[in-house]
Image (cartoon, rainbow, N blue to C red):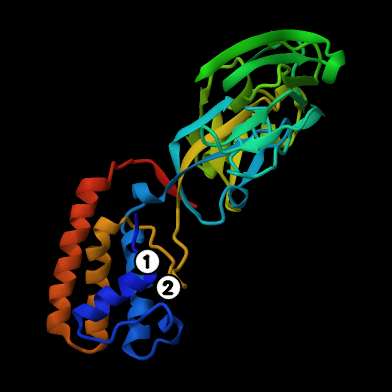
Amino acid sequence: MASSYLVLVNNVLRDMNEVELTSSTFTASRGVQTTVKDYINRSISDILNSELNWPFTHAEGSVDVIAGKQLYSYASIASTLKYVDYDNMLLKPKNYITNGTYEIAGSASITGWTTVSGSPAASSKFGNTLLLTNAEVTQQIDDLIVGRSYTVLTQTSGATLTLEIGTSSGGSQTTSSTLTISNANEVLLTETTFTATATSHFVSFTEAAGSAAFVKLVELTENLTPISLKYLSYEEYTERFRERDSRADVDKFGDPEYVYTTYNEEIGLTPIPKNSNRSLSFDYYVTATALSAATDESIIPERFEPVINARAKYYTYMFRSDTQTAQFALKEYEDGLKRMKVELLNRKDYMRAV
């Protein structure tokens, strides 16, 4: 939980014996009220900028690797991205399934899946699931590599489902693999493997008995070992590999071994990827958007609200030229910030600023 902008502002105003705001008067603040609003945002920024890797700013990113594509923009990952952890850059097997977790709760959308028969729908049971009752859905998967081994991982519950994987959709399925999943009383995790016989395959689910079946998760990945990438500065990349990569010789393409950053805020991979069968996975840290509406919440957890409070009071007292009281607030802020670092931080030595 985190406190709202209104609560943070009023806590400072109360401590300073000033008139508090309400949700209806928040946008019409005046004088010291407006000053405190500004200093709350400044205080949050100070706390976030004091360290690179606060856990409450952590996020996980991934980008599908495309054959022949070397550079991937940070902006396409997150507009608020600030720092990237290059210690944990991994090339993982790509998940070829679109919308395999049904993350839009209560929505009728089953984007990515084609209805073959019946009336499939999204459900909020077991979190978010695909509901099939006397229905069949299919999804076309492209860019597979003939002769390679793939795994389909599913998490389902309810009535018996038939999972088919083949080179055509619907009732004319040319089947590479068929799996009957029966697990009426629990959410069951199952997997099946198949060998690609074409670059395109179809994954299909069928419930034919008229009972409710729920699909919570579907993943299709090639059976590959994750690759841990080594970090290069752009200068190191230029010296060692840029000349080779600039020739764009397909015979020199392969599985990337190194990751580097450009001056245009891009992730670079070398060697240039030969296949589109992996995704780049990494940890990153975000900046906070300035609070604006009364109901906006701070990114900083509620239990550390006194640290924000102390910093904002320091700025306000300094604005009033009350330097003596400001120093007490500053000491309170510095002590609180130290406690935050002791409690929350797992320091990493290899962070890079974007």
Image quarter of the N terminus: bottom left
**Crowd rating for badge 2 (residues with CA inside 10 Å; few <14, some 14–19, many 20+):** some
223 vs 295, left or right, is right
Task: State the residue at coordinates (63%, 21%).
Answer: 221
For the question of whether residue 154 can be seen, the reply is no
- Vertically, is 296 above or below 224? below
Task: State the residue at coordinates (13%, 81%).
Answer: 325
Q: Of all residues shown, which one is farthest toward the right?
A: 172
Task: State the residue at coordinates (71%, 21%).
Answer: 210
Look at label 2 and name its amino acid: Ala
The percent position of residue 22, horizontal first and vertical second, equals 37, 80
**Displayed quadrant of residue 181:** top right
Q: Are marks 1 and 2 in contact (CB under 8 Å)?
A: yes
What SS does tag 2 mark? Answer: loop
Look at label 1 and name its amino acid: Ser
| Residue 128, label in figure | none
140 vs 326, left or right, is right
Between disc 1 and disc 2, whose residue precedes? 1
